Image (cartoon, grey):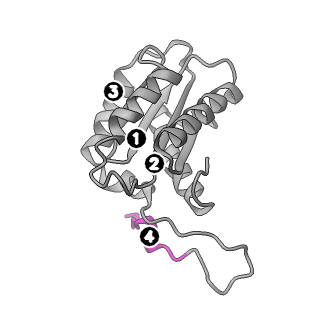
Amino acid sequence: MTVKYASSEIPFLRAESDAPAVNTPDCFFTDLILSRPASLNRFEARLRQTRIPGERLACALVRIAPLPEDPDHDRVKPGFEQTFNQVLDHERGIWEALDDSAFLLAFWDWETPQRALDLLESLKLKMSDAFDTSILMGVSFFPFHGFSKEETLENALKAADHAAFFGPDSL
């Protein structure tokens, strides 16, 4: 039997090391792989059912930093949807709210991985400007090293954890 640990339980940051300072994230998105919230399961089901032309896919987790003037996050979801539709659209991608400030997205129909990253950078910049706050993003691509589409989504969660260590506005 394999023992499973939550990311926050693994003491891999050592304060006494000579490595450059990093920030410990306030939440570990990788833990969602174990806890399986309904929003993650819904997104995975939609991803499995979506017909993706060309079989190339980019998955991302987007986290919008808390907005002091909007503690209930009333602006975040409609703002994310509007920005998603400006940069991508429902013909080339899908998204799901993970919680009040984090969103999962998948999109396709890009020529090169660099073009996909450019689209994500554009999405990040527009959201950062719209909300006047920092945006954290974790990204992964399919196909990549034999990972399945489902694993690509999990890799995006892991990438978000990695980006969080580098601080706000990391991709």
Please report whichever mark, 1 or 4, sits nearer to the chain's N-terminal start: 4
Q: Secondary structure at mark 4?
A: helix
- Mark 2 crowd level (few <14, some 14–19, many ≥20, 10 Å Cα): many
Q: Amino acid at mark 1?
A: Phe
The foreground one among 125 and 140 is 125
The reply to whether the magenta stretch includes residue 2 is: yes
Q: Are marks 2 and 1 in contact (CB under 8 Å)?
A: yes
Q: Is residue 134 above or below residue 119?
A: below
Q: Is residue 55 above or below residue 121?
A: above
Question: Which residue occupies 55% across, 33% down?
Answer: 123
Query: Which residue is identified by label 4?
Result: 8
Q: Are marks 1 and 3 in contact (CB under 8 Å)?
A: no
The reply to whether the magenta stretch includes residue 88 is: no
Residue 62: x and y in percent read 47, 43
Q: Secondary structure at mark 1?
A: strand
User: In the figure, is residue 162 to the left or right of 21?
Assistant: left
Distance between the alpha carbons at the discs numbered 1 and 3? 14 Å
Query: Which residue is identified by label 3?
Result: 46
Q: Amino acid at mark 3?
A: Arg
- Mark 1 crowd level (few <14, some 14–19, many ≥20, 10 Å Cα): many
User: Of circles 2 and 3, which is in front?
Assistant: 2
Residue 23: x and y in percent read 58, 69
- Mark 3 crowd level (few <14, some 14–19, many ≥20, 10 Å Cα): some
Q: Magenta residues?
A: 1-11
Q: Amino acid at mark 2?
A: Arg
Q: Is residue 42 above or below residue 31?
A: above
Distance between the alpha carbons at the discs numbered 3 and 4? 29 Å
Please report whichever mark, 2 or 3, sits nearer to the chain's N-terminal start: 3
The label number, if any, that marks residue 63 in the structure image: 2
User: Of circles 1 and 3, which is in front?
Assistant: 1
Q: Residue furthest bottom?
A: 16
